[in-house]
Amino acid sequence: MADKLAALRSLMSAHSPPLDALVVPSEDYHQSEYVSDRDKRREFISGFTGSAGLALITMHDARLWTDGRYFLQAEKELSDQWKLMRMGEDPAVEIWISENLADAAAIGVDPWCISIDTAQRWERAFAKKQQKLVATSTNLIDQTWKDRPAASVNPVVVQQLEFAGCTVAEKLQDLREKLTQEKANSIVVTALDEVAWLYNIRGSDVSYCPVVHAFAIVTKEAAF
């Protein structure tokens, strides 16, 4: 574990701009709570295997936030390199950063792994000390994860209409009507369950979740 943190901190120092801290969420590029083995970045760096949590690595500290379901599990799984932060009892990660890191500190995160709402909330907290949220150009965990599992390549199954309830064409028509109401020209669908529902497909790219790794784009004239 210490070797992983040392390698990560080396990448943080070499980043442009250099990072004072790195946030590693549990979520993948689709904001999923349950992710494939390839996307278990927070588990890789921390050793904590619960489905929910967030890791923060600074140059001298490593902390893991998780909720009450996982307090006992995290205590057992985290090494002495890590400090457990209990959600609901300890300060939220953005508050802890704003109170404990230096003025103008640079806090890195892979922008694909957090929502815009989360990013904006963090930026408001960081503004008190002119701290900056930095979108990393690559995922630094991936660069340290030498034996990272390969991407899943599994069959896609078309859901039968008797189970789907509506055809894809009907769903696209309803969605386009909603786009018109919202005065929008297109929509990007990132959540895996929403893609599966919209296109009546199922898969096995994530264990115990019948979804396919995919993004979708729907315009007034086309769907991808």
Image (cartoon, rainbow, N blue to C red):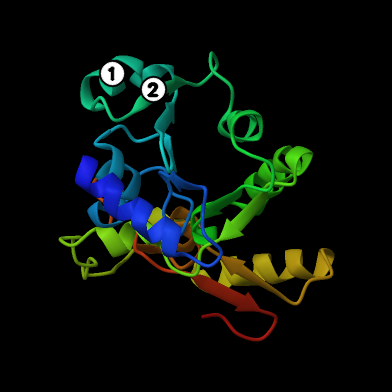
Q: Amino acid at mark 1?
A: Glu
**x 21%, y 47%: residue:** 3
Can you give x and y, in whole percent of width and height, for residue 79 in the image? Answer: 23, 27
Q: Nearer the viewer, residue 32 or 157?
A: 32
Real-space CA distance between mark 2 and mark 1, rounded to the nearest whole angstrom? 7 Å
Residue drawn at the location 63% of the way across and 39% of the way down: 102
Residues at marks 2 and 1 touching, judged by CB atoms closer than 8 Å: yes
Question: What is the secondary structure assignment of the residue under circle 2?
Answer: strand
Task: Find residue 39 and report its horizontal and vertical position in percent.
Answer: 32, 55
Quarter assignment of residue 201 = bottom left
How far from the left and from the top, in percent, is residue 168? 50, 70
Location of residue 96 by image quarter: top right
- Which residue is more in the foreground, 113 or 198? 113
Q: Position of residue 89 (x, y in %)?
A: 53, 13
Q: Which residue is mark 1?
A: 75
Q: Amino acid at mark 2?
A: Leu
Q: Is residue 91 left or right of residue 4?
A: right
- Which label belongs to residue 99? none
Q: Is residue 157 left or right of residue 17?
A: left
Instruction: In the rendered structure, find residue 84 and report the number of the disc placed on it.
Output: 2
| Relative height, residue 215 to residue 47 (above, below) | below
Q: Secondary structure at mark 1?
A: helix
In the picture provided, is 8 more to the left or to the right than 18? left
Query: Is any part of residue 203 visible from this angle?
Result: no
Task: Tell me the residue at 52%/59% (across/down).
Answer: 18
